[in-house]
Amino acid sequence: MIYENGTQKLLLTEEGYINLTGTQQYHYYLKDHQGNNRVVINQSGTVEETNHYYPFGGVFGTTGNTQPYKYNGKEFDTKKGLNWYDYGARHYDAALGRFTTNDPLAEKYYSMSPYTYCADNPVKFIDPNGMEYAPGDLFKTKRAAAKDWGMYYNGASIIRKREMGSSIYEVKQKGKLKGYSYSAANEGEHSVSISLPPNGERFVGSIHSHGDADAEHINNKFSKADIKYIEKTKENGYLATPSGDLLEYNPYSKKTSIVTSDLPSDPKDPKRKNNINPKDIPAEKGKQRMKELLQKPDLNIPVSQREHIHWVF
């Protein structure tokens, strides 16, 4: 409920809002895949507002201005000419592509400025609450989320010869399941800690990659350590392999199945399943170098604040 001068003005709903001043009328949002409010229509189907956005949230080509909820569905505050979006934990300036205050969880992202929006990749990610970025798309199933993760991260994992790992989690609104997503990936050499879901979101699975094809290590199947971790979580685990497979391990049936064989793959893997060449992720380069520096014992940083790379049991 939104009040203005002590009087009820708007009742916000999941799909739009109800105007409570004068004659009550329903208004509905048409959103894109990132939750941006692109069109507002009234209960008669009349278009009242349209919005178009630059990648970092700047508004252009707008017609009408009937309500303030725009980019990512966040309130656009135009008071005093600031033109900031209210993300809850902090405000965001789309003209700069930066938050106005530092990230409350900045220690999770050592290689990035604490003012950065979505790792400087607003096409791929959104920031639901001003603290942690996540994929803009929601997925209907855990498998669909795992496949998208593999398409995005497996190529970088192969090129960098590093393992990567994330949590798969539920996304709920007002107690109702809306879909699934995954956390930004952690990175390690021959093992990796699974990054945690955003605060308050329920963990429902894990996914990681095994880097490039390496004769010295088990790459195209779950290792014993992988299986031990998955069985401890009691949630299905997924593995993106250098051969291009996405594997799923069920901790109850203890069986492994192939979800797809269409992930980016390592050209030098003799068991390669496809001809999809790997590509790196430019926006995230330098993250691992910062992690390595933070683990050097001669740095004047408390051990409790360093990020260690290992499986957590």
Image (cartoon, rainbow, N blue to C red):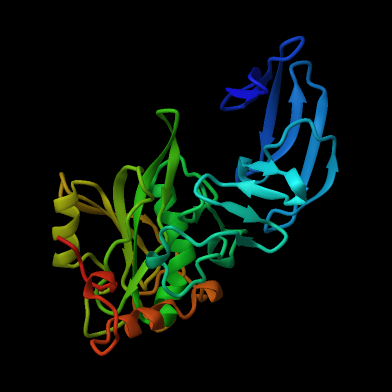
Q: Give the camera-side residue of 66 and 219.
A: 66
Drawn side of residue 309 relative to residue 277, left or right: left
Q: Give the camera-side residue of 118 and 210.
A: 118
Residue at 19% x, 50% y is 233
Q: Which quadrant does the C terminus fall into?
A: bottom left
Q: Which quadrant does the N terminus fall into?
A: top right
134 to 116, vertically: above or below = above
Which quadrant would residue 110 be assigned to in this image?
Answer: bottom left
Picture coordinates of residue 15 (x, y %)? 61, 27
Residue furthest to the bottom: 298
Drawn side of residue 36 relative to residue 150, left or right: right
Picture coordinates of residue 219 (x, y %)? 27, 74
Residue at 27% x, 87% y is 296
Which quadrant would residue 35 be assigned to in this image?
Answer: top right
Q: Is residue 239 visible?
A: no
Q: Is residue 223 visible?
A: yes
Which quadrant would residue 96 be assigned to in this image?
Answer: bottom right
Drawn side of residue 103 relative to residue 100, left or right: left
53 to 31, vertically: above or below = below
Q: Give the camera-side residue of 155 and 275.
A: 155
